[in-house]
Amino acid sequence: MKKLLMSCSRVWVAVLVFTLLLSVNAFALNGKVDGEEIDSSKYIADTLWVLIAAFLVFFMQAGFAMVEAGFTRAKNAVNILMKNLIDFSMGSIAYWAIGFAIMFGAGGWFMGFSGWFVPSETDAFSSLEWSSVPTHAAWLFQLVFAATAATIVSGAMAERTRFRSYLVYSVFITGIIYPIVGHWIWGGGWLSNLGMLDFAGSTVVHSTGGWLALMGAIVLGARTGKFNGNGRPRVIAGHNLPLAALGVFILWLGWFGFNPGSQMAADASAIALIAVTTNIAAAAGAIASMITAWVRLGKPDAGMALNGALAGLVAITAPCAFVEPWAAVVIGAIAGVVVVFSVLLLESLKVDDPVGAISVHGTCGALGTILLGVFHNEQGLLYAVDKGAAFKFLGVQALGVIAVLVWCVITGYILFSTIKVVVGLRVSQEEEMEGLDLREHGASAYPDFSVSSMR
């Protein structure tokens, strides 16, 4: 009993010391909002909320790894896991060194030019003055977003990409291509100045990753055997649907950090509304996708339903803070329908995307950004008194979607084509048939089982 009491006392002392340390504004943007000091308790609450949200979004890396591994073949599972580990690791360094500065540093309409290697002083990041959290907390939260954009690409290029090539393009995406898009919309760039809104990144994060994934898949080409001699797609089944389902649930959980965390403050009513719109859009997306697949394919396809939930989450990411719950249901449902037809359309165009990343993130990210122009509870077409201003806002949203698409198509084509020539983008046919796990990593995800694939 005495030992138990001593242990409890030590815990309480540790908690007290930690609380006192938090109460000191030693975190240097340094307890200020637009240059004005805020209450220390709010500063602490804001910081803790943003960090917790960042941790949730970081865990989405595990979700992406499970989804991608489950939707692909067993012989490539280790490769998928390695890519999700290393893109975050390399992206962390690239985003710390240059990415955050390009995205949020003071600069012009195109990119930022200050804040290299993330200094603590806030003068370098004037575009973040609306948030009170420490510079390093803001960096960590934005880092996990950058890593999300990079890891989206790996799913669409799975099962036939050289690992060393993946290392190269993940650095360029996290360090340069994605941060420039972020600067345009979040960092005080030209789209921000036009009035474009994208609360948590339907376009900034998801469409950027989705359109880069599209270019990667095009330059790389389809998996061997995906299309027959007549150009018709063949089903290449993933090896573990339960694993993919687990990944979707992890991602759904992580989105409660992704969207509410983008408030960058512990504002109770705001983050509560965002959590509700986020969840309800995901649910509507899953239901709508299931029904659409049931009607179109004759079965309530599990893979389509899982991607429907993700489609709803992606689409609501831009409008989540600006729409009513009923509008979130509509947005999620539309995304759930669209993602099914997008997957089928890409297959008809002979674009091979093993996990549906292009449709989920590219197509539905663009869709959600544009629908914000319709359902925004003040500026949207359904609510705005001045319809001329509402149409202008909708036009800016569409312009932003198109601009990011063009940017990613051009930079993605240059990046992947250059890697293809200089390093080599695709493994040999022999390596692809044997599996990337053994050829690239000398390991198997299931060493106690005989792993084979249907030809």
Image (spheres, rainbow, N blue to C red):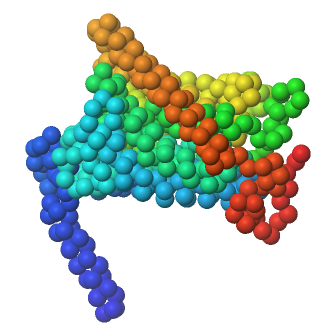
Image vertical order of residue 195 relative to residue 69, above or below = above
Asked whether 400 or 112 is in front, the reply is 112
Q: Residue at x 36, y 49 (%)?
A: 98
> Which of 253 and 314 lies nearest the eye of the viewer?
314
Q: Residue at x 27, y 32 (%)?
A: 108
Q: Position of residue 35 (x, y in %)?
A: 12, 43
Identify whether 387 is placed above or below 62.
above
Residue in the picture at 74% in, 29% down: 350
Q: Please tell me in which quadrant of the rendered image residue 152 appears.
A: top right
415 in relation to 446, above or below = above
Q: Visible in this render: residue 332?
A: no
The x and y percentages for residue 373 are 40, 19
> In terms of depth relative to the viewer, which is nearer, 16 or 119?
119
Residue 275 in which image quadrant: top left
Outermost bottom residue? 2
- Residue drawn 89% across and 45% down? 455
Quadrant of res 273: top left
Residue 229 placement, left or right of 318: right
Tell me: 69 left or right of 450: left
Q: Residue furthest front?
A: 422
> Can you say which quadrant of the picture contains the N terminus?
bottom left
Residue 309 pos. (x, y %): 57, 37
* Visible residue check, residue 116: yes
The tally of labels here is: 0
Residue 85 rendering spot, x and y as whole percentages = 55, 59
Query: Horizontally, is 208 left or right of 186 in the view?
Result: right
Instruction: Decide which of 5, 295 is in the foreground and name it.
Output: 295
